[in-house]
Image: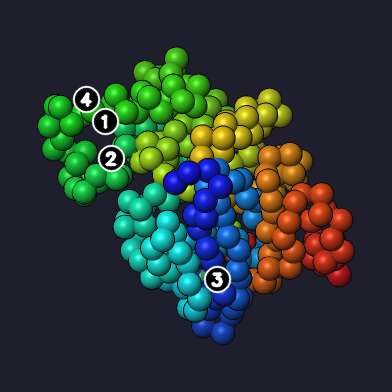
Amino acid sequence: PERGTELLTVAGVTKRFGGLIAVNDVSFDLKAGEILGLIGPNGAGKSTLFNLLTGISPATAGTISFAGERIERMASRKIARLGVARSFQHVLLRSDMSALENVAVGAHLRSTRGYLSALLRLDRREEERLLAEAMRQLDRVGLAHLAHEPAGSLALGQQRILEIARALAADPALLLLDEPAAGLRYREKQELAALLSKLGEEGVAVLVVEHDMNFVMNLVDRLVVISFGQKISEGAPTHVQNDVAVQEAYLGV
Ligand code: ADP
Ligand code: MG
């Protein structure tokens, strides 16, 4: 989708676990190329919301539209193929495989065959296509020089970026990141922020959950704040920072 066009629309989404309402009537939207931060205290419902967006669990009520399709009850593989990619809070790389091979696994996610069968019985031309695509993504994120190193030998910041390259290999229009800056050094956070800004300029929409306020305030175009499952504030970082409702939620008043 072209930069600035509506990509994701979350409308009145609720998720219950028995008697607990983890996400309560939340609405927001996201445009192609926009970087949106999702913040809120522990237990606010951020990860649950990510799970709804990626089809890990179905919404109890409300609708989620992505690129014109309703996805609130769609299977996660199908959502991934539509162009939603996610990286997890903890690095999930195969540390013994090379950086390139890790990204090639991601390049496969959008093809029609199953992921494991594909790994086991790729024909040679398909394998070469995937490796070429993986190299293109490594180049895009600035890790081409480490292509043949085992993923486990990379610094944590490089592993985080490698994980993003793997997600990008499926050619997503929307990238969901759960605490991408956690545990990184200052310099690594700067490199990560520069990469995410670049992706935004390329038209990729980024939705990022992050506890590091410095990182998130400098990075995002807009923020959505949730507390106890409900959206309590939304807007530019400076607006949200000065919002009394946000200050109270974080102080637990
Ligand atoms: P956050 O990511 O913002 O810290 P979560 O989305 O993980 O918050 O959790 C929101 C609420 O939903 C919490 O009260 C949590 O205990 C509850 N919760 C999350 N997942 C489940 C689940 N699978 N079953 C029951 N309760 C859950
Ligand atoms: Mg969480």
Q: Earlier in the sequence, mark 4 or mark 2?
A: 2
Q: Residues within 10 Å of mark 4 (few under 14, many from 20)?
A: few
Q: Amino acid at mark 2?
A: His
Disc tally is 4
Task: Give the alpha-carbon distance from disc 2 to disc 1, as whole Å.
Answer: 7 Å
Task: Give the alpha-carbon distance from disc 2 to disc 3, as whole Å.
Answer: 31 Å
Helix, strand or loop at label 1? It is helix
Q: Are marks 2 and 3 in contact (CB under 8 Å)?
A: no
Q: Amino acid at mark 3?
A: Ala
179 horizontally vs 117: left or right:
right
Decide if residue 17 is in sight here.
no
* Residue receiving disc 3: 11
Q: Residues within 10 Å of mark 2 (few under 14, many from 20)?
A: many
- At 50% from the left edge and 21% from the top edge, which residue is drawn? 142
* Residue receiving disc 2: 108
Task: Give the alpha-carbon distance from disc 4 to disc 2, as whole Å.
Answer: 12 Å
* Residue receiving disc 1: 130
Q: Are marks 2 and 1 in contact (CB under 8 Å)?
A: yes
- At 17% from the left edge and 45% from the top edge, which residue is drawn? 117
114 horizontally vs 187: left or right:
left
Q: Earlier in the sequence, mark 1 or mark 3?
A: 3
Q: Are marks 4 and 1 in contact (CB under 8 Å)?
A: yes
Q: Amino acid at mark 1?
A: Leu
Q: Are marks 4 and 3 in contact (CB under 8 Å)?
A: no
Helix, strand or loop at label 2? It is loop
Q: Amino acid at mark 4?
A: Glu
